[in-house]
């Protein structure tokens, strides 16, 4: 985890809003306050001169009506960014939470996520709270101090004699108070304190409570606007016919029948396919059905799931690039009395966010306005500029909240934005490019397939003396190096590979000799991408099912066995103990079997117990999933629990059903009938306890995913004696009711 | 030109008879609360009420609607049970990304209108056509039980 030395002095600009009120804007430069500048029109790009820095977007507004609006640089994708980030600001500001609302920020350098060295607005890697926490606290604290200073001046008292509470500055001695709204204009003329005191966590009034989501109302009355809902005058709708195999190119297009469909306006060939542009979705869909394209597939992908799996399995026999090496596994293996090993396989999986991908582009030849639900707005905007031939300040990019992301909307290659920009460039008229569910399912950028081999060596005393873990998979982050995909970002120095790779190296057990290695697989014609919890999904599955096998081998209880191997990992141990207590480990009802797993990552820790039953005809029922999570400090515990519930269900979908199969390069799945996801009737009881360690904030968007699979597999073993070494379970003849 | 009744108002729309009701609502009438999720009656994101019956608008040709009354999420607060559902959804922080929730709310309202004390099995039956990729099912179940036990 990385934190920049983002100083408040660089971060905050304060001014009086037109019509009164306090405008807090971001930008570098001096700390003196200045008269009102209207918020710029969201143009971003790194600041080059001090003057330009002043024009960068606003961060927060305090109105004379006491309303506070916080602009949020992380995308709301369901995780609650529009609630939790304002809570952090409001805490240090001592605001009345009921008067706080939130908006997505513009795409601008000052909203970049500190987690990514302040280079990107990038809502991935469970980084929103971890990244923004410190900076948001400082902003809130600085503004609070300025409000106090303004009141002190007005009343002619010492600032230190005043206190704040719920959006009021209070003078206890003088028996008077003033609201933040009343003080906001005067406060804007105060200088920005360089070192405002931060609260002692013990005196938090907002952090650690569970207010309602700021977006709850709009998400229950149909008024919340997603990219899919953007509507601008004169807007056309386009669907893109894509090649059946990745990287195919349109060779010849017969658009007569398509153009004959009423409402179809034009057909445009772009690098990624052929766009049918129409007055509305229905006409575009009919037009696309009527379109005839023959594809050049000379360079197209021919990935075939069956042969790819064989290839991966063969490569498990060859050493890869070491990513963790403790002691000497070779020596330990030679001295071992026994070495056990197991191979695992995980297929490609689709993110299948509820809102299919879509982008609106209004390009007129010299400027563009773009709307899309994205986790990667900064890179999207750069690629849009490259495609459209525009400078960053000629593009007004609206980062829309999204109907789910799970990583698919965080593509550093900006595939969906580039496609839409090519269509808009050809049209020079506002257009919404919509992906149908089938387009979304077949469009690539999947969780990559993976093969994993784990081995453990035991000495004559039944102690584990060596552990190896080898992976063959596409590593998305590492691929970026090879493909030089970030060339467009000439200012960006990539951190060393070891810091960026998504491979799991955090195997927590006390084993002296550990070797983890990986085969960096680059398949340019098989687009893959991170999906919620990335490689932890497969790596932790292998690790946590294999450790169960070892527990059995040495005749120990899987919980007690882990506990003893975690003697130097207090936070792992604490969640393990908490979940065993919450789930009544070892006391399940008759006919119900339990499995357990534990992990730590993203600065957070989790242990989960899954309870299942398996009938004689292999009908698998998941009864209950219990989780104990330690995310350091929970900003909004109710939303932390919601994220764990969400992750459990997401993981069950993947573990039970998740599989994208390719035959000779062609994806076989298309919609929720052949790519099922978990539904209400299949959802177990989900119980979650928060272990409040009081440590620094951790990420919670992904931590609930990886342990579900192995805990479930371990429970199936307890029920049937059968070891699960590949996914999904629906492939293994389990019947899932 | 076709005339349909939506949220108590009669609208004349210029759309072919086979255009799905979902896209007429979203594009012609600018009622974007009903969502496109699959287009194949597989996910429930587009659920509206037609004469009170929960219906997948993505596969309903607008020409087949006739005189029947269409109600969408934008108007569901005007039904007593619809407003209870919205309130419970907010109170329990049900929505995450929220994209499926219009459909969930329309399905839950229809369930509670026909069954004031649904069992877990009743909820499974009524709600399993509505996918939520964010996994809000446990809270949806809880919210439905809460309304039934406290307010109906
Ligand atoms: S969009 Fe109608 S059921 Fe999915
Ligand atoms: S809340 Fe996101 S799909 Fe249901």
Image: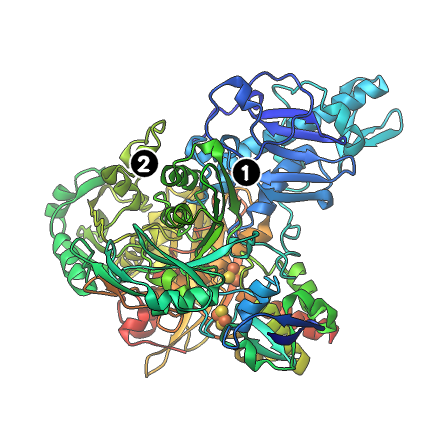
A539 or A688: nearer the viewer: A539
Residue A333 position (above or below residue B57): above
Does mark 2 have its CB less than 8 Å from ligand 2? no
Residue A239: x and y in percent read 40, 60
Tell me the residue that label 1 is attached to.
A106
Tell me the residue that label 2 is attached to.
A486
Left or right of A363 on screen, residue A205:
right
Can residue A543 be spotted in the picture?
yes
The chain holding disc 1 is: A
Residue A192 position (above or below residue A520): above
Quadrant position of the N terminus of chain B in the picture: bottom right
**Mark closest to the chain's N terminus, 1 or 2:** 1
Residue A437 occupies which quadrant of the picture? bottom left
A246 or A621: nearer the viewer: A246
A703 or A398: nearer the viewer: A398
Residue A126: x and y in percent read 45, 45
Residue A480: x and y in percent read 28, 40
Left or right of A45 on screen, residue A556:
left
């Amino acid at each position: 985890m990385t934190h920049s030395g983002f100083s408040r002095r660089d971060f905050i600009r304060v001014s009086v809003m037109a019509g009164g009120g306090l405008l807090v804007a971001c930008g570098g430069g001096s700390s003196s306050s200045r008269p009102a500048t209207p918020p710029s029109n969201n143009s971003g790009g790194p600041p080059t001169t001090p003057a330009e820095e002043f024009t960068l977007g606003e961060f927060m507004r305090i109105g004379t009506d006491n309303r506070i609006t916080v602009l949020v640089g992380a995308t709301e994708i369901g995780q609650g960014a529009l609630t939790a980030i304002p809570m952090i600001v409001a805490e240090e500001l001592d605001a009345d939470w009921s008067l706080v609302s939130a908006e997505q920020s513009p795409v601008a350098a000052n909203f970049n996520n500190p987690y990514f060295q302040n280079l990107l607005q990038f809502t991935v890697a469970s980084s929103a709270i971890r990244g923004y926490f410190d900076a948001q606290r400082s902003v809130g604290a600085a503004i609070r101090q300025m409000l106090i200073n303004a009141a002190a001046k007005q009343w002619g008292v010492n600032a230190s004699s005043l206190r704040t509470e719920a959006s009021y500055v209070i003078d206890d001695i003088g028996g008077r108070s003033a609201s933040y709204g009343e003080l906001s204009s005067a406060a804007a003329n105060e200088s920005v304190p360089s070192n405002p005191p931060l609260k002692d966590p013990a005196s938090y009034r907002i952090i650690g409570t569970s207010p309602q989501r700021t977006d709850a109302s709009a998400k229950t009355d149909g008024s919340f606007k997603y990219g899919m809902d953007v509507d601008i005058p004169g807007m056309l709708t386009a669907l893109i016919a894509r090649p059946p195999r990745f990287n195919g190119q349109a060779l010849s297009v017969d658009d007569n029948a398509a153009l004959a469909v009423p409402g179809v306006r034009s057909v445009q060939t772009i690098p990624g396919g052929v766009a049918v542009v129409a007055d509305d979705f229905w006409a575009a869909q009919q037009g696309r059905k009527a379109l005839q394209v023959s594809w050049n597939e000379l360079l197209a992908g021919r990935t075939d799931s069956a042969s790819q799996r064989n290839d991966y399995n063969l490569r498990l026999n060859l050493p890869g690039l070491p990513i963790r090496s403790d002691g000497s596994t070779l020596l330990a293996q030679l001295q071992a009395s026994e070495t056990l090993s197991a191979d695992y396989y995980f297929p490609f999986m689709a993110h299948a966010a509820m809102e299919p991908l879509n982008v609106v582009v209004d390009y007129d030849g010299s400027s563009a306005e773009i709307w899309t639900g994205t986790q990667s707005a900064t890179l999207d905007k750069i690629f849009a500029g490259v495609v459209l031939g525009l400078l960053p300040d000629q593009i007004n990019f609206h980062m829309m909240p999204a109907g789910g992301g799970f990583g698919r909307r965080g593509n550093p290659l900006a595939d969906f934005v580039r496609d839409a920009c090519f269509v808009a460039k050809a049209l020079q008229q506002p257009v919404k490019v919509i992906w149908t569910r089938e387009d979304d399912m077949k469009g690539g950028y999947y969780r990559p397939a993976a093969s994993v081999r784990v081995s453990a060596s035991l000495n004559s005393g039944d102690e584990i003396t060596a552990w190896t873990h080898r992976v063959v998979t596409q590593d998305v982050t590492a691929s970026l190096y090879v493909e030089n995909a970030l060339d467009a970002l000439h200012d960006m120095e990539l951190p060393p590979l070891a810091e960026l790779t998504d491979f799991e190296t955090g195997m927590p057990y006390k084993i002296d000799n550990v070797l983890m290695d990986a085969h960096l697989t680059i398949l340019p014609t098989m687009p893959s991408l991170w999906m919620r919890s990335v490689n932890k999904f497969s790596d932790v599955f292998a690790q946590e099912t294999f450790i169960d096998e070892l527990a059995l081998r040495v005749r120990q209880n899987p919980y007690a066995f882990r506990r003893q191997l975690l003697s130097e990992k207090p936070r792992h141990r604490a969640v393990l103990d908490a979940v065993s207590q919450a789930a009544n480990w070892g006391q399940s009802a008759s006919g119900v079997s339990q499995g357990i797993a534990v992990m730590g990552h993203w600065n957070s820790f989790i242990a989960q117990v899954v309870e299942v039953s398996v009938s004689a005809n292999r009908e698998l029922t998941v009864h209950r999933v219990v989780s104990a999570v330690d995310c350091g400090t929970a900003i909004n515990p109710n939303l932390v629990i919601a994220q764990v519930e969400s992750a459990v269900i997401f993981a069950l979908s993947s573990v039970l059903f998740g599989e994208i199969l390719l035959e000779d390069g062609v994806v076989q799945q298309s919609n929720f009938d052949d790519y099922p996801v978990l539904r209400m009737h299949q959802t177990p009881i989900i119980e979650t306890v928060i272990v409040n360690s009081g440590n620094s904030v951790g990420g919670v968007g992904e931590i609930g995913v990886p342990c579900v699979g192995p805990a479930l597999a371990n429970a199936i073993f307890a029920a049937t004696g059968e070891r699960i070494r590949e996914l999904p379970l629906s492939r293994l003849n389990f019947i899932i009711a | 030109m076709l005339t349909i009744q939506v949220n108590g108002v009669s609208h004349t729309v210029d759309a072919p008879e086979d255009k799905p009701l979902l896209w007429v609502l979203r594009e012609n009438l600018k009622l974007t609360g009903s969502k496109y999720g699959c287009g194949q009656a597989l996910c429930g994101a587009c659920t509206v009420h037609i004469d009170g019956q929960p219906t997948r608008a993505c596969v309903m040709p607008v020409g087949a609607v006739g005189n029947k009354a269409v109600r969408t999420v934008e108007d569901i607060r005007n039904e007593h049970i619809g407003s209870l559902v919205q309130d419970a959804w907010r109170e329990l922080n049900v929505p995450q990304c929220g994209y499926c929730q219009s459909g969930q709310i329309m399905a839950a309202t229809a369930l509670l209108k026909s069954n004031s004390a649904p069992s877990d099995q009743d909820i499974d039956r009524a709600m399993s056509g509505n996918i939520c990729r964010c996994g809000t099912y446990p809270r949806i179940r809880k919210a439905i039980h809460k309304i039934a036990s406290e307010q109906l």
